[in-house]
Amino acid sequence: MSPLGLVIAALAMMAGTLVQGSIGFGTNLVAAPILAIINPDLVPVPVILASFVFNVLVARRDQGERPWQIMRLPIIGSVPASVAGAAAVALVSQRGLGILFGVLVLVGVALSASGRHPRHTPRALLAAGAASGFMATTTGIGGPPMALMFQRERGPQLRAALARFFGVGSVVSFVTLLAFGQVAWADFARAAVLIPGGLFGFWLSKHLAHRLDHGYVRHVVLAVSATSAVIVLVRALL
């Protein structure tokens, strides 16, 4: 990769981890599309490995209250849905899936903005986890369903919960790709190239998160979720 490519990759990871470290999700939304343009070999495995590192860092920084217990049902829902998503990619039109999920996320954002929000019932938690796992596999963007579910949580609690959920999701994605022979030793070296820029973004996120925690986290979650939906729709329609 050229020196310019390395700089752009570092800036992309910095921006992605800045967003993720501030609201709990966003690395794949911000960084992955740019990395894919710079060098297709940087996705999906290297960015998955790098994202796992940053989810661990966020989880260590934001402990929250009983985050593993809260994430138990969403994680259970996400694992089979991720496998189903892999099958859907082979059998169903990705264009149709992208349009469907983009519209559903925009409807969810609109309902949330109107003052309605989903209750944390066991069924809703399982469904949110399943939707996130399925969307992550089929569209590459799985953050909005879980973020919308927990949008009214305090910033540290939201970040603590989502960091654990997406950390487990990274492991599931990596193991699945490994099982299908899609992981090479070179992917670890490429992930190492992405980490320095991401570390700077993570450091910056501490300061941004502190500001957002004063009543702005929910607004940013809704804005980023809506942006995710638009990106998915644009990809599907082009």
Image (cartoon, rainbow, N blue to C red):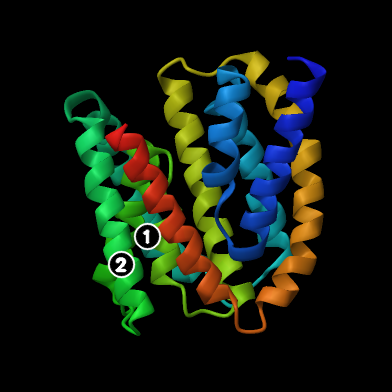
Q: In the figure, 61 relative to 65: above or below?
A: above
Name which residue lies at 58% across and 61% down: 24
Residue 58 sits in quarter:
bottom right
Name which residue lies at 66% across and 63% down: 22
Q: In the figure, 214 relative to 56: above or below?
A: below
Residue 129 sits in quarter:
bottom left
Label for residue 131? none
Q: Nearer the viewer, residue 78 or 94?
A: 94
> If you read the primary sequence from the N terminus, does the residue marked by circle 2 or circle 1 appear first?
2
Q: Mark 1: which secondary structure?
A: helix
Asked whether disc 2 touches disc 1, contact meaning CB atoms under 8 Å apart, the reply is yes
Q: Nearer the viewer, residue 107 or 76?
A: 107
Judging by the rendered image, the residue that carries numbered circle 2 is: 108
Q: In the figure, 205 relative to 151: above or below?
A: above
Name which residue lies at 73% across and 14% down: 1
- Badge 1: few (under 14), some or many (20 or more) residues near its Cα, within 10 Å? many
Kindly report the distance in space between the C-alpha atoms of the residues bearing marks 2 and 1: 8 Å
- Badge 2: few (under 14), some or many (20 or more) residues near its Cα, within 10 Å? many
* In this picture, residue 25 sits left or right of residue 236: right
Residue 177 in view in this figure:
yes
Give the tally of numbered discs.
Answer: 2
Residue 23 sits in quarter:
bottom right
Label for residue 145? 1
Residue 48 in view in this figure:
no
* In this picture, residue 74 sits left or right of residue 88: right
Which of discs 2 and 1 lies nearer the camera? The answer is: 2
Name which residue lies at 22% across and 48% down: 100
Quadrant of the image containing the C terminus: top left
Q: Position of residue 137 (x, y in %)?
A: 37, 37
Q: Position of residue 180 (x, y in %)?
A: 40, 18
Amino acid under disc 2: Gly
